């Protein structure tokens, strides 16, 4: 039977299929104990993620943020969390689980649930509705809405899945008839709302957010390529223009006097953050970076922000006092945080946040190695001085040189130290809750937060020198 799809469409899809084309970088091995633990933890975290998908009684494709239903109740599907989890699963499907029917089935279930989300009646009457019930209906109670990073993350995940799926199945129909319309719906929405206030990824602040804009830019840049290869030049140009406009806005979040990126502008409601510091900026670098030097993990302003944020938590949490040299700083969301995992009092370190630092460092090593190295300047000097006492403005670390090798070895050890902190505070079975107590270090908050495990999977991929796209 003749294919209903033109040869042009098939060839276009073929051009999309190359995945993970960046060179595999031999990230220095660092701490051998953490390397061995990471190999085991990767399997545990991946298995836990899968176990939180399609729990009994839920609609097909429901990804629970956690199976915890009380104290706190996280038994919902957040568009953001689900997209980031599905993105980590797609990475596995594209690498170590190629052609795996179970993984493919779960990813198709995710798509089915998300396509339903796009047509559900919601309180905000928009695609930025943040969370949905196990049966697929939208949550209708009071909440911080809209959250417009969700559609962008979903589009990025579906584009990644489209590439991998077609590469492994040659199924043009599913990509063209199911994935493409869902991707375009989300990105068309982003084009129209990107400059509007919305709630942040922590659901607490209404404003314009660095993280949200970075995720939007990521989706639109990838979407422009996707649309262009599939012959929709109008959408491709629209997405490309919007992405450039967003990039221009992102540039305004840099505070030169403070030497870091602030997280929010135009705040109209929500939690006050006088410092402007937030780990969301680093999450944005890991998840929204495109390898083009625009606020990527190894870029100057991101590194400077990492230094400022870590310093704030080093003095804030009691468990960070008198740390052994092989532990990294326990990191929370932002210094002014009061959310304790089930209410408001004193906030705690988060596994996602602490793991984010490890991933940032591993990704930075790959970025510097694949590029032309790095040069110390007034913005990044404090970061490099942590790893090289002789770091001065103008010093150049060239890949392959002794100074570069020494630098990346020290950065890799520091990244492993953050994972050592995670390992120390998790339970022996590999469980990862949302938070761990700022005084005792014991796990608290939602149990086995699916995003905590997805963050571990992507951090360990970066440690292996194959960071997820």
Image (spheres, grey):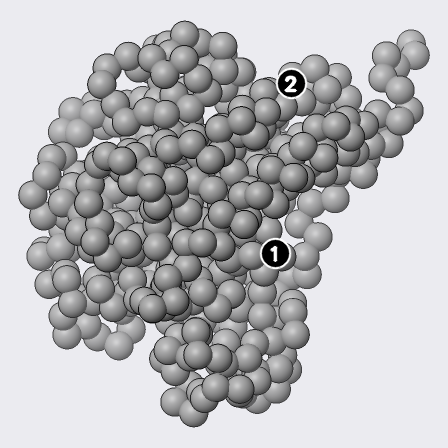
Residue 344: quarter of image: top left
Mark 1, secondary structure of its residue: loop
In the image, 207 versus 426, the foreground residue is: 207
- The answer, for residue 209, to whether it is visible in the render is yes
Point out residue 451 in the picture as x, y percentages from the top left corner.
37, 39
Which quadrant, please, contains the N terminus?
A: top right
Distance of label 2 from label 1 (alpha carbons): 27 Å
Point out residue 167 in the picture as x, y percentages from the top left corner.
74, 34
- The answer, for residue 456, to whether it is visible in the render is no
**Residue in the picture at 22% in, 18% down:** 142
**Residue in the picture at 13% in, 55% down:** 438
Outermost residue on the bottom side: it is: 390
Point out residue 404 in the picture as x, y percentages from the top left corner.
55, 82
The residue carrying mark 2 is 181
Above or below: residue 280 compared with residue 296: above
The residue carrying mark 1 is 291
Residue 107: quarter of image: top right
Mark 2, secondary structure of its residue: helix
């Amino acid at each position: 039977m003749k294919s209903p799809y033109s040869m042009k469409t098939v060839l276009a899809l073929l051009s999309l299929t190359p995945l993970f084309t960046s060179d595999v970088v031999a990230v220095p091995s660092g701490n051998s104990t953490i390397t061995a633990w990471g190999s085991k933890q990767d399997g545990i975290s991946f298995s836990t993620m899968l176990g939180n998908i399609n729990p009994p009684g839920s609609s097909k494709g429901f990804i629970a943020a956690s199976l915890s239903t009380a104290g706190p109740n996280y038994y919902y599907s957040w568009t953001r969390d689900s997209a980031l989890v599905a993105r980590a699963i797609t990475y596995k499907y594209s690498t170590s689980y190629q052609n795996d029917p179970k993984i493919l089935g779960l990813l198709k279930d995710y798509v089915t649930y998300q396509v339903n989300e796009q047509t559900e009646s919601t309180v905000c009457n928009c695609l930025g509705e943040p969370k949905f019930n196990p049966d697929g209906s939208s949550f209708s109670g009071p909440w911080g809405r809209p959250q417009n990073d969700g559609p962008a993350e979903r589009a990025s995940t579906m584009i990644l899945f489209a590439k991998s799926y077609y590469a492994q199945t040659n199924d043009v129909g599913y990509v063209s008839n199911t994935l493409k319309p869902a991707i375009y719906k989300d990105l068309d929405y982003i084009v129209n709302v990107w400059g509007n206030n919305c709630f942040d990824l922590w659901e607490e602040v209404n404003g314009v957010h660095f993280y949200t804009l970075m995720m939007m830019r990521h989706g639109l840049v990838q979407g422009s390529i996707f649309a262009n290869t599939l012959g929709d030049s109008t959408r491709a140009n629209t997405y490309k223009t919007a992405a450039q406009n967003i990039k221009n806005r992102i540039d305004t979040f840099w505070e030169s006097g403070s030497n870091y990126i602030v997280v929010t502008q135009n705040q109209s409601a929500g939690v006050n953050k006088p410092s402007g510091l937030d780990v969301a900026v680093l999450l944005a670098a890991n998840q929204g970076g495109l390898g083009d030097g625009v606020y990527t993990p190894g870029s100057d302003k991101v590194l400077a922000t990492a230094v400022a944020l870590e310093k704030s938590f080093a003095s804030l949490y009691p468990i960070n006092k008198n740390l052994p040299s092989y532990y990294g700083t326990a990191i929370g969301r932002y210094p002014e945080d009061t959310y304790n995992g089930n209410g408001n009092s004193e906030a705690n370190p988060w596994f996602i946040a602490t793991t984010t630092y490890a991933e940032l460092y591993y990704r930075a090593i790959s970025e510097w190695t694949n590029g032309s190295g790095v040069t110390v300047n007034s913005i990044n000097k404090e970061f490099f001085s942590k790893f090289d006492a002789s770091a001065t403005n103008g010093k150049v670390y060239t890949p392959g040189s002794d100074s570069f090798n020494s630098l990346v070895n020290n950065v890799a050890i520091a990244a492993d130290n953050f994972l050592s902190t995670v390992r120390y505070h998790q339970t022996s079975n590999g469980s990862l809750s949302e938070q761990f107590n700022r005084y005792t270090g014991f796990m608290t908050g939602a149990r086995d937060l699916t995003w905590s495990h997805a963050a571990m999977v992507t951090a360990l991929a970066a440690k292996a020198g194959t960071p997820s796209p």
